[in-house]
Amino acid sequence: MRRKRKFGKSFLSLALSSALVVGSAGFLSGCGSKGKSSSDEPIQLTVFSMLANYSGKQAGWGADVFKDKFNVELNYVQPDAGAFATRMESEDLGDIVIFGNDSNEYVQAVEAGALFDWNEDDLLDEYGADIKKYMPDALEKNKKLTKKITNGKSDTLYGFGGNVAASAEDHASFLYTWDIRWDLYKKLGYPEINDLDDMRQLFKDMQKICPKDDSGNKTYAVSLWPDWDDAMVMYIKAAATAYYGYDELGIGLYDPATGTYHGALEKDGPYLKMLQFFNKLYQDGLLDPDSMTQTIDQVGEKVRSGGVFFSIFNYSGSLVYNSKEHKESGRLMYSLKPKEASPIVYGMNTQGNDHIWTIGANTEYPEKAMEVINYLSTPEGYMTMQYGPKGECWDYDENGNTYFTDLGAKCNANQKTSMGKLHKGTYADGMIQLNNTTWSIDAENLDSAKGETFNKETWKNVIEGDLTEIEKDWHTKTGCGTINEYMEIGKYTVSPGTSYSKSRQDDNLKVTWSQVTDCIKNNSWKAIYAKTDAQFEEKVEEMIKKAGEYGYEECLAWSEKEAAARYDLELEVTGQKK
């Protein structure tokens, strides 16, 4: 057992004050759950993930994987209100600690000495050899980040950011895929879709020919959820990103093609234009009225039952709807991009992103924590995280091409598929709940045949598999073999991968930021639900006025400075910097 360390005094006072502000009720019971373990007993590892949507023990096939390979059980802790401050005060962030960004809590943890040095006792060399082998640029980025945080006093290695690419030569697959009910589009005669007005008319026509879902409930063009709102309403800014090609940054949207920054409240700017589009959908009866109060899981159920015609994202569209049963019955969600849209696609980045894998400083089992992270950083580990256990759900054929087993194909089509006698529960029950990546899904899988990535859409055995008639119709009509091939037709915007990480905000700006962004989010929802154009304009003007009083201009100035720093790094990567 390792001796517990003490955090710095300066940070303890900060953590304590944060805990008093945010609240720590009931959370201490989740801390310090580790203890001595016999060689037969599984070791309990606490995973504090600031990206988690789940709390409790890892279950099902995922639990079996970690038990069989490492004799560990993972216990997830969600980032509820006050959780970070409370765990910092108790001097125990957990064993495996995952940060959702590298600018706020992560900086505090580094300054407090709350994270384990990966070079201590040769931890990385002995237990993280695959991370060291596959992800050297991501590790180097983390050391540089430490140097920035400590003003050059240290370059200690604390972890790495996820979504790592094997090469920076290509872009990732498209996330904003403009999924629509292709079967309904076909019934309407494949009308030409040039812009948002055409999309709106298409939705109206779809609702006319399909007014009820499989359960007899009213259908809608789109269904939103508020869970992931941050500085703005997530779905609104995402739609702007998908249409204009501007990426979310700070309190607005950033154009990587020109470096231009558009504040959220810019008159006739991308955020307010898209906000108005969704209000129009609401006025037309095309936006799900439950959008402001439901979860993404509830949205998924509506999509699955045919109650939603459209999704900006594949994960709340085609990946949910396109079951074997739907496709065989002639129903499909697939991409239909308006001609005027220029959706963003992200450049591959060997340095990773800002969702950082770390280990808590006071873990009793740093070796086990590192073994788990290292395994997930191998091709097999990442494939397991994505598709289930090797040999049971997927494997490689004699030519090194990846394929789904019969069970894997069923699980891929329907996550509620039972794992049979092999594991308890369904595939969904055993999904690994870390909610972070190691590799990019579009990185080359170095264990498979050359050219295949971790993305199943690139697998020879998937591409050449049996297609249903409705799938063939999409391929024939678009002339494309894959979604990426289709999305690259016409306009799109590439956001280059760089080492950019957001600057830390001082305490005064944090307070102002919280007030301003809460104002924008709350009033944006009110504007979405406006019953008339006049009421919409009234809600927007009220939002602009209130946000200004809270300090919007200060937040905008910080965001513009960040955009300039990011653009400068992008010019370096693309070779355009003079």
Image (cartoon, rainbow, N blue to C red):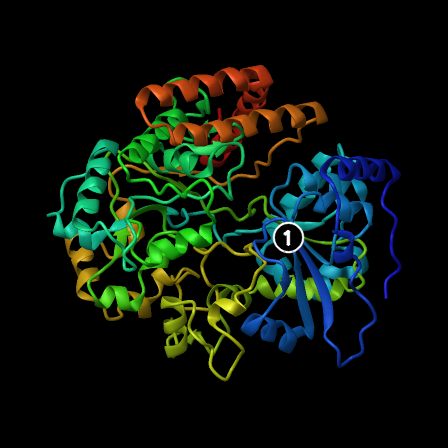
Residue 440 image point, x, y percent:
49, 54
Residue at image position (49%, 66%) is 383
Residue 489 image point, x, y percent:
25, 43
Residue 254 visible in the picture: no
Q: Quadrant of residue 236?
A: top left
Residue 547 visible in the picture: yes
Q: State left or right for residue 173 relative to residue 490.
A: right
Residue at image position (55%, 55%) is 435
| Quarter of the image that includes the N terminus | bottom right
Residue 329 image point, x, y percent:
21, 66
Q: Residues within 10 Å of mark 1 (few under 14, many from 20)?
A: some
Which residue matches tag 1?
78
Of residue 29 and residue 268, the one placed in the foreground of this image is: 29
Q: Is residue 236 above or below residue 60?
A: above
Q: State left or right for residue 324 relative to residue 28.
A: left
Disc 1 secondary structure class: loop
Residue 70 image point, x, y percent:
67, 73
Q: State left or right for residue 285 relative to residue 60.
A: left
Of residue 497 and residue 223, the one placed in the foreground of this image is: 223
